[in-house]
Amino acid sequence: MKQVVQNYKSGELAVLDVPVPGCKPGGVLVRSAFSLISTGTELMKVSEAGMSMLGKARSRPDQVAKVMQSVATNGVPATYRKVMGKLDSYTPLGYSLCGVVEQVGAGIDDVKVGDLVACAGNEHALHAELNWVPKNLYVPVPEGLAPQHAAFGTVGSIAMQGVRQGEPQLGEVALVIGLGLIGQLVVQLLAASGVRVVGADPDPVRCELAERLGAAACGDPASAAVESAVAELTDGHGVDQVYLAAGGGSNQPVELAARLCRDRGRVVDIGKCRLDLPWNAYYEKELDVRFSRSYGPGRYDPEYELEGRDYPIGYVRWTERRNLACFLDLVARGSVDVEPLVSHIADFDDAVETYQRLKDGELKAVAVLFRYPEQAGEADEAAAPAVAVPAVNVQRSPARGAKTPVRLAFVGAGNYATSMLLPHLTQRDGVELSTVVTTTALSAANAQRKFGFAEATTDLDAVLGDKSIDAVFVVTRHSSHAELTRKALLAGKTVFVEKPLALTEDELAGVLTAVEESGNDRLQVGFNRRFAPLLQEAKQRFGARTGPANLRYLVNAGRLQHGSWYLQQGTEGSRFAGEGGHFIDTASWLLEADPVSVYAVAPSGNEDLQVVLRYPDGSTATISYVTTGPASLPKETLDLVADGKALRLDDFVRASVYFENSTAGRKRWVSSRLPKARDKGQNAELAAFVKAVRTGGPMPVPLQSLVATTAATLAVQAGLAGGAPVTLEQAR
């Protein structure tokens, strides 16, 4: 991809070919549509780069102080090499853009591939074709807002944070000194807040523009026009706030602020101007001087910007992300108009020439946009995303002989374990509940009391080291499944792990590495639906097929309650990643094959999904996973059609099989009676697992099938991020 860079030592500007950034968890990969040149901040940086070394030192005394400290600590030669190395390297430009989400990283659920977003940050919203942007530095663009206008989001947030620092109130009067890009936006935001605005700038064109955009009066600060306007609007008292949006080395802005501000007024510094405060003037009026730090709270905080840790709204109402969203909303509703600020739109390939024209003064502009070439329809099929389905290679340890009773340990004793697994096991002959392990002592004690475990502990290592324990159940939160399974396999235990087996390809690879290292492939994942008696009988009645099949599976998952740990997608994966394996496994079991490709779309922008699986013989399975359906709709319905036959399952309470030769279209078989309760197969699954542990016989589901289902589930997220079918590549 291409990116605009500058060498700070030589001042050279260039458009370089650089690698595409990776799409890391906690953020999105965005293809730029428009990016905005900050004609103040960026041009200052470009101008500084063209200075001599002495000029650079004079313009950045803060950096000179750091160099002198380094000299005192490390000596002149080492400091010289360090400084020259840093200066003689390319640095990026840009910090405000709008683009289209091209890939979604793990833990992101508020946008999807194809969404238009506005992005901020001088490390993440660069003048580049592609940028990785962390969650708190992008927001979805409101419907109907043009991308070239949404590209103003960052500079709009800077102006908005400055206005918030001034705490304007209805009916007040404000003075904005400097009517460049930020100043023009400050004028509009103040006007939208019910504040009358006076503007000051030596450029008459900018003054006229500010008046068109809402200022009551504007003029050259060196003339009497500004002072007269302030006196008229305030009855001679002075303005309530002054916003310094000017740059440069002159001290006139802060002197003008003191002269025209009322007693105990507020002066807010937004731009980078000289601040030699005239002590008497500021002291006598007891002026409140405030600084506005960039886009708002969160700026320069790596935990907020990089790790996505938001500040609670009750404590920090307006963070930089909320400022960004608020500004875009104002533009979308017409309260702020950025179109008159656009002086020039340049093609991205002409970036170097555009900067040079701005620097030389040939191009006089308030705002300049880069327009990027459209990439739609240019995807290369050869570069289609793929997820590997690792092959299971294991030199199996010798099978042990039959043993009774089977001694089981549980790691985790949450709701699912205590409601769907342990009640069945306590009623099964030949099973001894040996030990329960939890992270809190009380939950272990509760499980011991209720289900009769011989021991309760919080020490996992002690359980894994206990040779008398035959099998370990892993029933913890999703993020811990793969690691706990790996440890238990290495300890030689037979393992039953609730879905999912893994949340990432690396986690899946780690489990299989443990299988290979230990020779222990005794693993079962809690895919219970294939064991449901009603579905088992329906499949038997349906019989064999010769041609490809079409399967439709509707899952009415419903909404989660606020506070559910399932919503912690940053650590626990998406909701579908957690339970989607159930439905993929059921489809693959009915079709008697593993999928070869996955296509996933999220049409509604929430957790609703459409997943299409393709199988080797041409069969397809469509899983509609919805969270927005009514509670009265059955949770799971399934239809399988092939060879003139059809199988229908209604929420595990009724099943039907239709045949082509049925008279008058009547069913040939319907489940003879409704079961007392939905039986989704947990009891039968546990019976099969215990039998395999007791006899040393084959596990209920082949390990390669468990791996294929897990890989297909992981491919759903990759498909959503890439917007294209994902091939499931079988490892050799």
Image (cartoon, grey):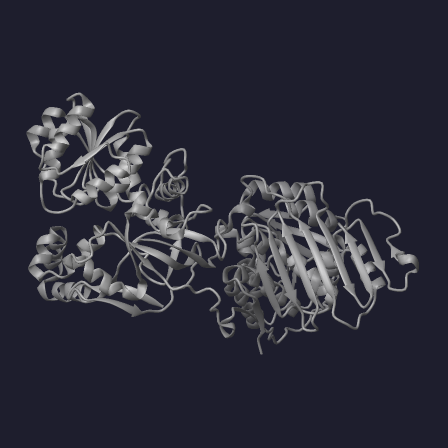
Instruction: Please indicate, yes or no, whether residue 301 appears anywhere in the rendered image.
Output: no
Whether residue 93 is situated above or below residue 315 in the rendered picture = below
**Residue shown at the point (9%, 43%) measured from the top left:** 250
**Residue shown at the point (52%, 52%) measured from the top left:** 572
**Residue shown at the point (68%, 62%) measured from the top left:** 621
Rendering quarter of residue 468: bottom right
**Percent position (x, y) of residue 368?**
27, 54
> Observer-nearest residue: 376 or 697?
376
564 lies left or right of 705:
left
Give the total of numbered labels. 0
Whether residue 42 is situated above or below residue 631 in the rendered picture = below
311 lies left or right of 49:
right
> Observer-nearest residue: 574 or 481?
574
> Observer-nearest residue: 514 or 61?
61
Whether residue 613 is situated above or below residue 211 in the rendered picture = below
Q: Residue furthest right?
A: 663
Query: Where, quadrant-wise, is the C terminus in this rendering?
Result: bottom right
**Residue shown at the point (58%, 65%) measured from the top left:** 711
Q: Residue furthest top?
A: 235
**Percent position (x, y) of residue 674?**
84, 47
> Observer-nearest residue: 577 or 77?
577
Instruction: Please indicate, yes or no, whether residue 272 appears anywhere in the rendered image.
Output: yes
72 lies left or right of 214:
left
